[in-house]
Amino acid sequence: MTSPEGLDLRLTQVSNKPIDKIEAYLQMKIDRKDFILFKKGVNKIDSEIDYSNKNYAVIFKKNHDLLMIEIPFDNIKEHRYEHDEFVEYTLRVMDDSSANPSIQFKKAKECSINKMFLEEAIRVLEENNSSFLPFFNIESQYFNVVYKNGRHYEVAVPAF
């Protein structure tokens, strides 16, 4: 795929298998990455609800912190994707062993992820000389992560 600016972009679909947030953190650690986009599992299935693919969250490193951002499930059910209602957590890892992990998720007062178009996210990534940027894609209404992979840009997107 080529962006309007002529950049070579590759879309990478993440797994559609629901996992919990601890499992997602451990997978990020195993993959030796600074972020993971994952589909969150739900505790109770309601046959009247279309879960589609909106129940995604992102865990990522920011400076010296680990953060997780999600859209509240009630908002997903009502198709409300208001940026000011996204929930951000700071992760405190006490034990990241695969046998008995212990991670605290502390809710933040506000959310630091931006809503933007893909082209804007690439521009911000370049301007900040960052290796990745999680964002909420205005066009698709999903969390995405744009990142550099060699000379190319890749975009982690939910599986469809």
Image (cartoon, rainbow, N blue to C red):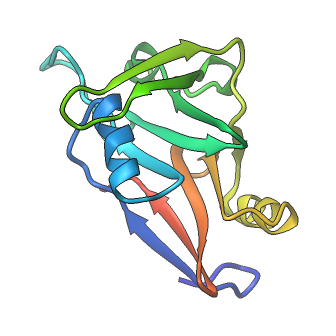
Regarding residue 120, the answer to whether it shows in the image is yes
State the image coordinates of residue 39 (x, y, percent, origin top left): 32, 40
State the image coordinates of residue 62 (x, y, percent, origin top left): 68, 42
Instruction: Quadrant for residue 19, please give it.
Output: top left
Vertical order, 82 against 149 (above or below):
above
**Image point 23% across, 37% down: which residue?**
98
State the image coordinates of residue 57 (x, y, percent, origin top left): 45, 36
**Between residues 65 and 132, which one lies in front from this camera angle?**
65
**Image point 33% across, 54% down: which residue?**
30
Q: The C terminus appears in which quarter of the rendering?
A: bottom left
Instruction: Quadrant for residue 18, please give it.
Output: top left
- Left or right of residue 148: residue 51: left
Vertical order, 57 against 10 (above or below):
above
- Left or right of residue 108: residue 52: left
Regarding residue 140, the answer to whether it shows in the image is no
**Image point 72% across, 43% down: which residue?**
63
**Between residues 111 and 92, which one lies in front from this camera angle?**
92
**Between residues 26 and 119, which one lies in front from this camera angle?**
26
